């Protein structure tokens, strides 16, 4: 599903954000990426969504070699990948409902279908009744859950979640993790970054540890293998 | 995407364009103001041009050169003169008016003056036969004059040639005014069209800058290029449509006001009555023209601006 071969990313001359990263993720896998701040976790995820281009190295996602990817094909690629951004990236002048609906409007889904789909997904992330709120009227955790709803509403083959539990109390953090597990169970490959050690320990999934732009350990989960 | 999906997306682009148009009304006012000026100049130039052409035509139709013949001129001499005149490059036609015809015309013209009529009927016909020469180009009447001033030709004439000189002056005045207006019009159209394009450019650049976060998010969510740039183009086309309608209203108002407050002729050389009629007769053609030109200016400048300022690169 995801293949990185000696990928290096240099933002500027001062240092490398990623250094010769090689990584393979199977379809339907659930991968957790951990590591200290600045280790390069977000950079790695940005390479997958083509938000950033690698300085060198090969990236293949879902059979698409990014080297041959044309600029106008990028939107189609991004539609297949759901992303929960570390900074949410909600549209500030749209309501909760509209923010989630927007992901569907882009791909040309009809209004009726959107009106059926969005509430279901908002229910999953526990935001029922807050459809009409604006993002600024939400708590950090609620915003995070809007971002998750938007990421999963298109039922992507791959879900990338950059610290989706960062702003959440333990109860809500676990709610989010349960949603991700559910999505994963239905067949979506999930890549999650987190600083939350408890989640890492309890999930018992494959854990990739990064440090200063390199992968320092990659151990398979105890509970599920492959 | 399927046809249905494309239709849905297209409707959404148009709708977003409308919403942005309303939301950015303040930003768009400068763009629309300049566009209205541009379109007004275009329409005014067209109408002024047509009006001048009409005025010139009216005067030209009436301009001619009259040559009065001696009674002693023989038919042969006369026909030769007519043929020679017709051979001149600038002569469109020559009409012969015999002494009898001249008398008839004279009597008609003075039908109210019975004293004069009585007096003239008591004498031999004193009116000379004449040739009325219609020039092709009233500006080049000199050529005909030179020919008529030649000694042997001059000898055939009884009176001084009449050139309707005052009309020529009027024509010269209007012709130079037309040329001036035409050139000023074209220059104005070009300058203001460029200014409106630049301002639309700027407006879109500002709108893109204001919405840069939103646009980045749209892109990250997989919005297509058209989905992102479409609303800007719709918005600019709306500027064009609104400006087109406004320019028509302004021209209409100008004619109404000037027709009411000014004596039609007091505006000098522009025949307001004719302009107004011409405008009314072609109203829908003009409305269509203004809308089309407005839409074109809007669409072209926004296409270029979005291409320039929305960088569709994969990163950022
Ligand atoms: N756009 C950028 N321009 C320049 N340097 C960048 C840019 N984005 C990230 N970096 C640098 O690249 C390195 C890796 O950053 P990255 O955001 O991937 O870290 P991270 O592991 O996600 O950290 P965190 O846990 O704090 O989110 C850091 O040193 C960061 O300063
Ligand atoms: Mg990060």
Image: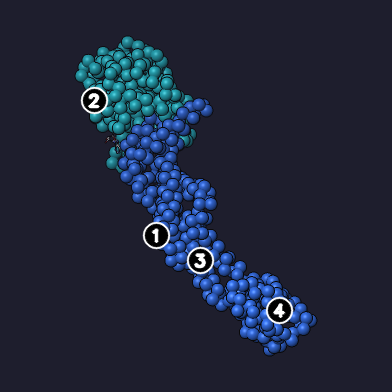
Q: Nearer the viewer, mark 2 or mark 3?
A: 3
Q: Residue furthest left?
A: A169
Across and down, in percent, residue A92 comes to 29, 32
Q: Which residue is mark 1?
A: B261
Mark 4 in CB contact with mark 2 (< 8 angstroms): no
- Mark 1 near ligand 1 (CB under 8 Å)? no
Labels 2 and 3 within one chain: no
Colour chosen for chain B: blue
Badge 3 and badge 1 in a common chain = yes
Is disc 3 in contact with disc 4, using a CB cutoff of under 8 Å? no
Which comes sooner in the sequence, label 3 or label 4?
A: 4
Q: Nearer the viewer, residue B129 or B111?
A: B111
Position above or below: A166 against B134: above
Residue appearing at x 38%, y 27% in the figure: A103
C-alpha separation, residue under disc 2 versus residue under disc 3: 67 Å
Using the rendered image of the protein, determine whether residue A196 is visible from the camera's viewpoint: yes
**Within-10-Å neighbours for mark 3: few <14, some 14–19, many 20+:** many
Are the residues tagged 4 and 1 within 8 Å (C-beta)? no
For the question of whether residue A19 can be seen, the reply is no
**Numbered label attached to residue A138:** 2
**Residue under numbered circle 4:** B99
Q: Which chain is cyan?
A: A
């Amino acid at each position: 599903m995801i293949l990185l071969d000696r990928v290096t990313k240099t933002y500027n001359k001062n240092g490398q954000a990623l250094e010769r990263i090689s990584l393979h993720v199977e379809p339907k896998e659930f991968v957790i990426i951990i590591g200290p701040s600045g280790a390069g976790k977000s950079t790695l995820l940005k390479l997958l969504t083509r938000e950033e281009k690698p300085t060198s190295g090969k990236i293949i996602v879902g059979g698409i070699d990014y080297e041959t990817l044309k600029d106008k094909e990028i939107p189609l690629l991004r539609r297949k990948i759901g992303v929960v951004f570390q900074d949410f990236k909600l549209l500030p002048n749209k309501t909760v409902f509209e923010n989630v609906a927007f992901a569907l409007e882009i791909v040309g889904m009809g209004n009726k279908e959107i009106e059926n789909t969005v509430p279901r997904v908002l229910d999953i992330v526990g935001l029922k009744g807050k459809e009409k709120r604006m993002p600024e009227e939400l708590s950090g955790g609620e915003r995070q859950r809007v971002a998750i709803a938007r990421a999963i509403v298109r039922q992507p083959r791959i879900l990338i979640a950059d610290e989706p539990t960062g702003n959440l109390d333990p109860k809500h953090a676990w709610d989010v993790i349960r949603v991700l597990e559910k999505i994963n169970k239905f067949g979506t490959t999930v890549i999650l970054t987190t600083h939350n050690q408890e989640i890492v320990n309890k999930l018992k999934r494959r854990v990739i540890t990064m440090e200063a732009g390199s992968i320092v350990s990659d151990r398979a989960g105890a509970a599920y293998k492959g | 995407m399927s046809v249905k999906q494309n239709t849905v997306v297209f409707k959404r682009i148009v709708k977003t364009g409308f919403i942005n148009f309303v939301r950015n009304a303040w930003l768009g006012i400068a763009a629309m103001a300049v566009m209205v000026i541009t379109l007004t100049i275009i329409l005014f130039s067209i109408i002024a041009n047509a009006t001048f052409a009409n005025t010139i035509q009216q005067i030209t139709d009436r301009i001619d050169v009259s040559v009065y013949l001696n009674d002693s001129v023989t038919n042969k001499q006369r026909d030769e003169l007519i043929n020679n005149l017709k051979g001149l490059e600038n002569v469109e036609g020559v009409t012969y008016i015999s002494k009898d015809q001249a008398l008839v015309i004279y009597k008609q013209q003075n039908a109210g003056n019975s004293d004069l009529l009585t007096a003239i009927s008591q004498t031999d016909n004193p009116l000379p036969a004449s040739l009325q020469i219609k020039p092709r180009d009233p500006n080049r009447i000199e050529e005909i004059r030179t020919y008529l001033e030649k000694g042997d030709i001059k000898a055939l004439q009884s009176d001084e040639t009449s050139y309707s000189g005052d009309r020529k002056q009027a024509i010269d005045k209007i012709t130079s005014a037309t040329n001036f207006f035409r050139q000023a019009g074209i220059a104005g159209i070009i300058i203001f069209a460029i200014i409106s394009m630049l301002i639309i450019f700027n407006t879109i650049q500002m709108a893109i800058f204001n919405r840069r976060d939103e646009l980045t998010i749209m892109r990250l969510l997989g919005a297509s290029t058209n989905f992102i740039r479409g609303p800007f183009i719709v918005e600019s086309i709306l500027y064009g449509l609104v400006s087109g309608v406004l320019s028509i209203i302004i021209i209409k108002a100008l004619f109404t006001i000037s027709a009411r407050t000014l004596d039609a002729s007091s505006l000098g050389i522009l025949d307001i009555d004719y302009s107004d009629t011409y405008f009314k007769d072609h109203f829908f053609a003009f409305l269509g023209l203004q809308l089309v030109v407005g839409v074109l200016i809007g669409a072209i400048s926004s296409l270029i601006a979005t291409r320039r300022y929305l960088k569709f690169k994969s990163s950022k």
